[in-house]
Image (cartoon, rainbow, N blue to C red):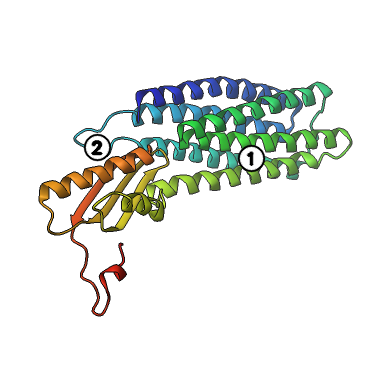
Amino acid sequence: MTADRYSAVVRVLYRVLFLNLAVAFAKLALGYTTGAVSVLSDGFHSLTDSASNVVALVGVSVARRPPDANHPYGHRKYETMASLGILLFLIIVLVEVVSSALDRLKSGAVPKVYPEGIGIMIVTLVVNVVVVAYELRQGRRFNSEVLLADAKHTRSDVLTSITVIAALVGVGAGYPLLDPLAALFVAGFIGYACWEIAQGASRILADEIVIAQDDLREIVLAVPDVIGCHQIRTRGSADHVFVDMHLWLDGAKSLQDAHATSHVVKDTLMARFPQIADVVIHIEPPPPRPPGREASETPRD
């Protein structure tokens, strides 16, 4: 992790925070003015975009700290924890949206619909589309799961805004039931966003494989003097990977030569995969050949 990378992520988050606040306040003002529960739900959904940006900023500020005595692997997972904070906000919004929609279904109140209101929703929709495209592009550029998680959150805002605009048009045409139904539809989008963020965070926290073993093995076996490798393990996030492996070298090699070869393997892997933060290699002689097999038949891994 470099200071430049974290600084770039922070700049993206501040820009997105400003746009999300503008969109949220516009939707909330419109929702309270018209009494449309679908617009209010969408406004609170957008407001959590802003709250999640704040959580992400806090998470990134902690994640950028270098390794220390109590955190020898660094603080990178705090960024993942920040994405879980985004998930928490989404769950809170999900409960509120469903509750408001059910209350409206029971009361049967009819919201007021103005052409200007639909125009405001269309403008906020365009802003959200721009934000999603920008944040996804920057998230992939910097391999930041907090940016990607926040982009998924905002992407659900795009879908919900389209649904809300359609509902407002329907209410204006004399179908008030579409307002609470659209709010429930919003809840479905929010729930899906929750699922996506939970999956992404759980993969990192549960140490799911990050780089395919075959891809690493191919690089390792191309290094001179390497007989084979096994027990290849990777963990971490897409941009901060830790690798462990057992490396087979000729048992007659001196410790100094074996150590030098292991460093060549490590340097080669880190040059090929810049996202690797560290490689831990256990050196050992290859296992004995099974009886009746020629040396050329001995598997290299």
**Is residue 17 depicted above or below 39 in this figure?**
above
**Image coords of residue 68 (percent x, y):** 22, 32
291 and 216: which is toward the camera: 291
Residue 130 placement: quadrant: top right
Left or right: 31 as drawn, with respect to 228: right
> Mark on residue 71?
2
Name the side, left or right, on which 168 lies relative to 272.
right
Judged by depth in the image, the label closer to the viewer, 2 or 1, is 2
Q: Alpha-carbon neighbours of circle 1 within 10 Å: few (<14), some, or many (≥20)?
A: many
Alpha carbon distance from label 2 to label 1 = 40 Å
Secondary structure category for the residue under label 2: loop
Q: Label 2 is placed on what type of residue?
A: His
Looking at this view, name the residue that lies furthest to the right.
Answer: 173
Of the residues shown, which amino acid type is indicated by label 1? Val
Residue at image x 27%, y 76%?
293
Which residue appears farthest toward the bottom when viewing the image? 292
Residue 63 at what x, y percent from top left?
A: 35, 31
Residues tagged 2 and 1 counted as in contact (Cβ below 8 A): no
Residue 42: image location, x then y, percent: 66, 33
As helix, strand or loop, the secondary structure at mark 1 comes to helix
Name the residue beneath numbered marker 1. Answer: 97
Q: Looking at the rendered structure, which numbered label has been put on residue 106? A: none
